[in-house]
């Protein structure tokens, strides 16, 4: 499953997009940082990573892969959380 990570220029939310399903999951920047931290912690434990993240609307998304993929995803989420926070602060 391919998941894209970005941010909403209007709200500052971090968005995770499941491309095959064309489904968007919104996370406030603080919640997104918690997801990134959980991915990092799981990756440091070694082996395959699978976490279940709950979006702001209560829907759940499964994230993971091998440790390297999880670390890259965590970094992307964290960067977009920083951008989202900056957008929220400017409004």
Image (tube, rainbow, N blue to C red):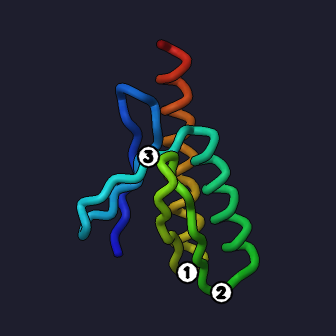
Q: Residue at x 56, y 35 (%)?
A: 82
Q: Residues within 10 Å of mark 3 (few under 14, many from 20)?
A: many
Q: Label 2 vs label 3: CA separation?
A: 28 Å
Q: Residue at x 51, y 78 (%)?
A: 65
Residue 78 at x, y percent in the picture: 57, 47
Q: Label 1 vs label 3: CA separation?
A: 24 Å
Q: Residue at x 52, y 50 (%)?
A: 77
Asked if labels 1 and 2 touch by Cβ distance under 8 angstroms, the answer is yes
For this rendering, which residue is in front, 53 or 77?
A: 53
Q: Residue at the top extreme?
A: 91
Element under disc 1: loop
Element under disc 2: loop
Q: Residue at the bottom extreme?
A: 47
Residue 52 at x, y percent in the picture: 57, 69
Mark closest to the chain's N terminus, 2 or 1: 2
Q: Label 2 vs label 1: CA separation?
A: 6 Å
Q: Is residue 37 above or below residue 84?
A: below
User: Where is mark 3, residue-wise?
Assistant: 26
Q: Residue at x 73, y 73 (%)?
A: 44
Asked if labels 3 and 2 touch by Cβ distance under 8 angstroms, the answer is no
The quarter of the picture where residue 49 lies is bottom right
Mark closest to the chain's N terminus, 2 or 3: 3
User: Where is mark 2, residue-wise?
Assistant: 47
């Amino acid at each position: 499953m391919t998941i894209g990570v970005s941010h909403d220029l209007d709200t500052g939310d971090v968005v995770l997009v499941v491309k095959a399903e064309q489904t968007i999951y919104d996370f406030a920047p603080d919640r997104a940082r918690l997801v990134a931290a959980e991915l990092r912690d799981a990756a440091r434990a070694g082996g395959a990573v699978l976490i279940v993240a709950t979006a702001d609307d209560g829907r759940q998304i499964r994230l993971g892969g091998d440790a390297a993929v999880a670390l890259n995803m965590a970094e992307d989420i964290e960067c977009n959380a920083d951008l989202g926070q900056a957008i929220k602060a400017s409004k």
